[in-house]
Amino acid sequence: MEIVEILKALSDETRVRILHLVQEKPLCVCEIQEILGISQSNTSRHLIKLKNAKLIQGDKKAQWVYYSLAPDTFQEYSFLEELIKNLNLYKALESDRQALISLQEKGISCETLTKE
């Protein structure tokens, strides 16, 4: 059942944090890993679970895949959209949002992160 997979995917704090970030803008693995302070392999593992649950989609641009919310799933299960909107109410996720803003302001992207 698809709904069970969705609920399982939402049961992990890191995956919820990732959803919160990609609602702001499409992000690649290295950007997500930088913001959350977790390894590339751990980031990829969480992205795979979110993708398998059809909560996110990946769009390949050059050598990077940018992840964003999967609109079809959010349209089919309206409670998900409400959940994502309400994530902004949790102060714990605000530091992730600020880290994303900081990366953007510094002009840091996949291109610059992979050169380091």
Image (cartoon, rainbow, N blue to C red):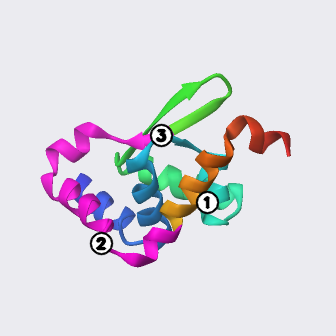
The residue pinned by badge 3 equals 26
Vertical order, 58 against 84 (above or below): above
Residue at 67%, 65% in the rendered image: 38
The residue lying toward the viewer, choosing from 54 and 34, is: 34
Report crowding for label 1: few under 14, some 14 to 19, many 20 or more residues within 10 A (C-alpha): many
x then y, percent, for residue 98: 53, 62
Q: Which residues are magenta?
A: 67-95
Name which residue lies at 25% across and 59% down.
85
Say whether residue 24 is left or right of residue 88.
Answer: right
**x then y, percent, for residue 94:** 45, 69
Front position among marks 3 and 2: 2
- Distance, label 2 to label 1, CA atoms, is 19 Å
The type of residue carrying mark 2 is Leu
What's the amino acid at mark 3? Pro
Which residue type does callout 1 highlight? Ile
Q: Secondary structure at mark 1?
A: helix
